[in-house]
Amino acid sequence: MMVKPQLRIAVDGRSLCGERKGVGAYTFNLLEQLLLLDPSVTILLVTDHPLPASGWVADSRVRVVDASFPWHNNFLWTNLSLGRQIRRRQCDVFHSPGYTLPLWLPVPAVVTIHDISYAAHPEWYPHGDGAIRRAWYRHAARSADIILTVSEFSRREIVRIYGVPSERVLSIPLGVDPRRFKKIEQEDALASLRQRYNLRGDFLLFVGDIHRRRNVERISEAFGLVKESDGKYQALELVFIGRVLESALLAPKAAGRHGGSIRLLGYVPEEDLALFYNLARAFVFPSLYEGFGLGALEAMACGCPVIVGRGTACEEVAGKAAVCVDPTDTKSIADAISLVLNDPSFAASHSKAGMERSRNFRWARVAEETQAVYHQLAKPG
């Protein structure tokens, strides 16, 4: 019987440090499932901060290297600390789960590009060093052996904007963990969340980094229109969860006299997210440009009706389970919110459709398809 060769993968593990956001969720779930799938795999995780040895990180096949760097500079750390560790240690493939690669690598490289909004619409990019970042991201895309992305929408955009051969860009949709994101019936857990976050009644929910591309001004304006349209929604709140990268977008004037009903909660622990999705009347995410929309998928898995913008990957991911709106039309967003709030059967049908749709997105499948890419690139023997 032919013995499967050992597969040694080096991974940029920085997204696993601290508060876990989109790239961190992708990295965590991919590697967890990869270890379950393939007993021959070993993983070298290179980080810039220590990782707690818990869960799969404590697996004997995982080695964590803390390559801390005296300067807080992404470019220097990637090319000096990360690059040095990969050159010093034996590995078959290097995988960057988030956009960037060292300028020179001795092994085949995979980079995951979740979306390229920064290149398609640089006017929306909230970072001051945007031009430098865009040049580096473009170089990483063009030098990678394989580019992974998370939707057909993003695959087409990467090929169109970067001009890379289409056969080098593979779409592997993200997954959702049914152990974490599911319908929750425990009233005590839901009541505890309400108490801890002072949630007085019904609320709409947004989850994600808060910046111009996410259309938060129109969300706030649509929220104000809904409250003004019917007196029974005077107690309705709009809850934003995520980093505020452009605070001016959420000034109280955005929702007029209803700005006091907007809640900015920042980062919340992952174990609380599922409870928020379960309690929210609707997940409102009419982003102007999105590579996938993981929050929408998590909300669907929890039975929360989702409202997304047409023309982005969110529409591709949610399919007919979502209420799709014109993201440039505030009234279109407000009308969708009102429909979900006022028509219980409409909301229930989208809740059921979302839960059914979410079952098509499995992290195990992400690991299976990514493993095939690793084996394709790994050097023989």
Image (cartoon, grey):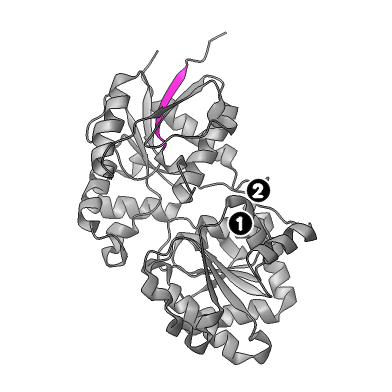
Q: Identify the image quadrant of residue 169.
A: top left
Q: Identify the image quadrant of residue 119.
A: bottom left
Residue 10 lies in the magenta-colored region: yes
Image quadrant where one finds the N terminus? top right
Magenta segment main secondary structure: strand
For the image, the number of numbered tags is 2
Q: Amino acid type of disc 1?
A: Leu
Give the image location of residue 177, x and y in percent: 62, 46
Seen at 48% across and 22% down, the residue is: 42
- Please indicate, yes or no, whether residue 107 appears anywhere in the rendered image: no
Residue 60 lies in the magenta-colored region: no
Give the image location of residue 335, x and y in percent: 57, 83
Seen at 54% across and 58% down, the residue is: 295
Q: Identify the image quadrant of residue 229.
A: bottom right
Q: Does 187 sit above or below residue 94?
A: below
Q: Which residue is mark 2?
A: 180
**Which element carries disc 1, helix, strand or loop?**
helix
- Please indicate, yes or no, whether residue 32 appears anywhere in the rendered image: yes
